[in-house]
Amino acid sequence: MSRKASPKAGGKKVFLRQLDKLLPLIGVIVLLSLWEFSATSGWISEVLLPNPIATISELWTIAFRPEDSLFADFITTLARTLQAFAIAALLGVPLGIMLGSYERLYRSVEFLIDFFRSTPASALIPMFILFLGITDWNTVVIPAFAAFLAIIFNSAYGVMNARQSRILAAKVMGANQWDIFKDVLFWESLPQIFIGLRTGISIALVMVIVAEMFIGTDRGLGYRIIQMQQILNVKDMYASILVTGVLGYCLNMLFRWIEKRTVHWSGR
């Protein structure tokens, strides 16, 4: 006779599932606690590190004020990040799949991809300035280039590392090269492509912030952070850093959500 799960066991499982949903809050609590302790213990001057409540209060104050609002800088940075990512994805995914489909072709350009991928994109900012000048366009082109390298690398390896057993099974069933590509290779490479996309969106945001800090622009979270640091408006500076971190986290969670629903069969 099969044993039925007791109500207590079922209730315990439900409780544990609900508890698991709260696990991400532990990191937030630890961060805020360390921040509060550092700001109030006297280890760091409160002039240089305001406490979390003061920072969040400042964030609320500057978020939507008529002039120089944080929200306007947030929208500018978000728009630049999405533009850079779109350019990188539209170029990187098709080219990566094409290179991965012809491994010899990929090996012929592997050095160039790895060379620029291993070079910090921030080190290339002077080169881009020489070619493009000091314009807002650099705040999109440089992040797009950095994200493109991550996306094309992962897309190519996703195709090259496709399971040979499934490819052979498709050939045995009489599939031609196009059928193998669209029915096997493309779907096999999707998990790795999404890794490249998630990495690419993170790199794009980082490089947009860096470009806004050091290239002539008058808007964006990176510009705001460096300006507030220079005039020692530390509450505004930390509020801007906090918003930048939340933006990066939300973009990463968005792509994880899309990935789970798109490649839920990965590994099966």
Image (spheres, rainbow, N blue to C red):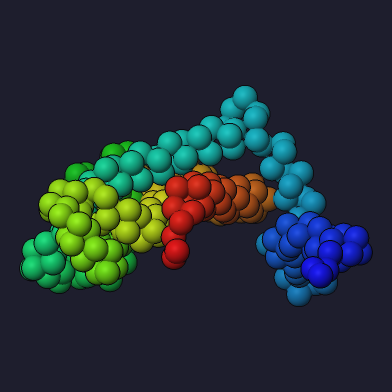
Q: Nearer the viewer, residue 113 or 143?
A: 113
Which quarter shows the C terminus? bottom left
Q: What residue is shown at x 54% (from left), y 49% (from top)?
A: 257
Q: Nearer the viewer, residue 12 or 260?
A: 12
Q: Tally the marks.
A: 0
Q: Is 89 left or right of 171, judged from the image as shown?
A: right
Q: What residue is shown at x 8% (from left), y 68% (from top)?
A: 104
Residue 47 image offset from top left, x and y in percent: 72, 60
**Residue 39 sits above or below residue 63 on the image:** below
Can the viewer see residue 218?
A: no
Residue 4 image offset from top left, x and y in percent: 84, 64
- Residue placed furthest toward the bottom: 43
Q: Is 34 left or right of 84, judged from the image as shown?
A: right
Residue 227 image offset from top left, x and y in percent: 51, 48
Q: Is 211 left or right of 116, judged from the image as shown?
A: right
- Residue placed furthest toward the front: 1
Q: What residue is shown at x 68% (from left), y 50% (from top)?
A: 235
- Residue placed furthest toward the right: 8
Which quarter shows the N terminus? bottom right
Q: Nearer the viewer, residue 248 or 22?
A: 22
- Residue placed furthest toward the top: 66
- Residue 191 image-quadrant placement: bottom left
**Residue 132 sits above or below residue 245 on the image:** above
Can the viewer see residue 239?
A: yes
